[in-house]
Image (cartoon, grey):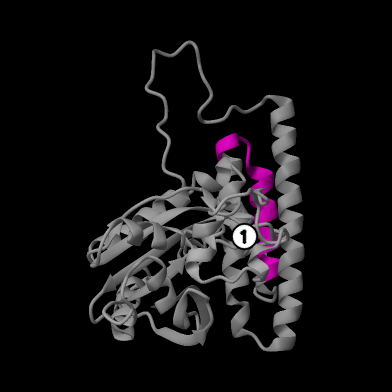
């Protein structure tokens, strides 16, 4: 590396990256370079994460310079990779050499969404919750009506929900791709008497534009507990223990009032992440009308419910910057887990 002490970190990183990229002469070397400089734990990512410590005017200038450098390095990497493939000078590490004796093929791994869901479910299972799974294609009755979501609620519009048969003439209403795993609340409560303690993982679908923090398909884990004497303190204790197990014993947690039709009162829970509060889930005490809809006596039983997105948790836990990576099928991303 030929950078001097007078160079700023971004200029120094540019010099170092360009020199090492020029020296990379194999597929393995190119991949190592990509991970070192552009990976989620790479040097450029480290600079971007430290921008928050700068003054606002410095942060804007440094952020723009870092993003320009990211574009330059990505373009240079793709150009070098294309040239390497075109020349045929290097072979990938997993290329087949027919002159070698037989080898056991490389084993695959679990998708990162599956990994984080299993970790989260293990945390709830150890607290006494049973895991149940439900339908991805759901009835309007369970997705909306039984959850105290009124007929004129915006969530029922075509702009928000992916309908399969909205105008079906049935007491159960239309058929749709579930917008949340919350329909498992009434389905389970219809099937058994209290006490109920379940978590329900699964994929959900919403008709919305995608960006770095939103996808039209995503996973959700719904939790439900119903029994005599359950209080908001039980809800807070459960979710605090969940945050402690997933994010560390010293993680700070904050609850704020929020509104969801199927709980009353409702809250959102945020965690302290690098000095800022980041919302990770919504929760609340089960609305008495939801209990009445399934035949429970709201004067006798109380309950709490919560819904958390595994991909949102993984964004924080693993330092991932774009939720769309989870569904892009890019092996460069998936192989890091």
- Residue 290 in the image: x percent, y percent? 42, 71
* 232 up-or-down from 238: above or below: below
Q: Is residue 337 visible?
A: no
- Towards the viewer: 136 or 171: 171
Relative horizontal placement of residue 255, taking residue 2 as reference (left or right): left
Q: Which residue is drawn at 35% across and 59% down?
A: 190
In this figure, which residue is indicated by the disc labeled 1?
322
| Range shown magenta | 10-28
- Is any atom of residue 200 visible in this view? yes
Secondary structure, mark 1, is loop
Residue 213: % across, % down: 62, 64
Q: Which residue is drawn at 53% across and 52% down?
A: 139
Q: Does the magenta stretch include residue 21?
A: yes
Direction from residue 323 to residue 232 in the image, left or right: left
Examine the image and state in which quarter residue 64 appears.
Answer: bottom right
Give the x, y percent position of residue 22: 69, 45
- The residue lying toward the viewer, choosing from 175 and 205, is 175
Which residue is at a point 71% across and 68% down the rendered structure image? 66
- The picture places residue 195, in percent across and down from the top left corner, at 23, 67
Is 298 magenta? The answer is no
The residue lying furthest to the top in this view is 99
Query: How many neighbours does mark 1 have within 10 angstroms: few (below 14), some (14-19), or many (20 or more)?
Result: some
* Residue at x 69% of width, y 60% of height: 208
In the rendered structure, the answer to whether residue 175 lies left or right of residue 303 reads right
In the rendered structure, the answer to whether residue 312 lies left or right of residue 176 reads left
In front here: 225 or 240? 225
Looking at the rendered structure, the number of numbered marks drawn on it comes to: 1
Q: Quadrant of the N terminus?
A: bottom right
Report the magenta stretch's main SS. Answer: helix
């Amino acid at each position: 590396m030929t950078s001097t002490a007078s160079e700023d970190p971004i200029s120094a990183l540019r010099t170092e990256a360009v020199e090492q990229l020029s020296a990379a002469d194999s597929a393995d070397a190119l991949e190592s370079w990509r991970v070192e400089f552009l990976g989620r734990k790479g040097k450029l990512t480290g600079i971007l994460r430290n921008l928050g410590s700068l003054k606002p005017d410095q942060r804007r200038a440094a952020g723009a310079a870092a993003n320009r450098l990211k574009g330059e390095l990505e373009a240079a990497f793709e150009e070098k990779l294309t040239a390497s493939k075109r020349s045929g000078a290097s072979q990938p590490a997993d290329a087949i050499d027919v002159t070698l004796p037989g080898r056991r093929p490389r084993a695959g791994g679990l998708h990162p969404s599956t990994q984080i869901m299993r970790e989260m479910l293990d945390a709830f299972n150890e607290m006494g919750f049973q895991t149940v799974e439900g339908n991805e294609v759901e009835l309007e009755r369970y997705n909306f009506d039984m959850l105290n979501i009124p007929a004129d609620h915006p969530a029922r519009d075509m702009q928000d929900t992916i309908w399969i048969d909205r105008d079906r003439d049935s007491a159960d209403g239309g058929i749709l791709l579930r917008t949340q795993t919350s329909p498992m609340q009434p389905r389970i409560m219809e099937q058994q008497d209290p006490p109920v303690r379940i978590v329900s993982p699964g994929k959900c679908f919403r008709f919305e534009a995608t960006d770095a923090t939103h996808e039209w398909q995503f996973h959700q884990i719904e939790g439900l507990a119903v029994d005599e004497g359950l209080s908001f303190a039980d809800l807070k204790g459960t979710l605090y223990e969940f945050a402690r197990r997933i994010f560390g014993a010293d993680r700070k947690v904050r609850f704020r009032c929020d509104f969801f039709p199927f709980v009353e009162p409702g809250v959102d829970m945020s965690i302290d992440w690098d000095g800022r509060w980041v919302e990770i889930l919504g929760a609340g005490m089960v609305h008495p009308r939801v209990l009445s809809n399934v035949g429970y006596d709201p004067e006798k039983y109380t309950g709490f419910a919560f819904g958390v997105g595994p991909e949102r948790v993984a964004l924080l836990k693993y330092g991932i910057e774009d939720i769309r990576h989870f569904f892009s099928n890019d092996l460069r991303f998936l192989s890091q887990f």
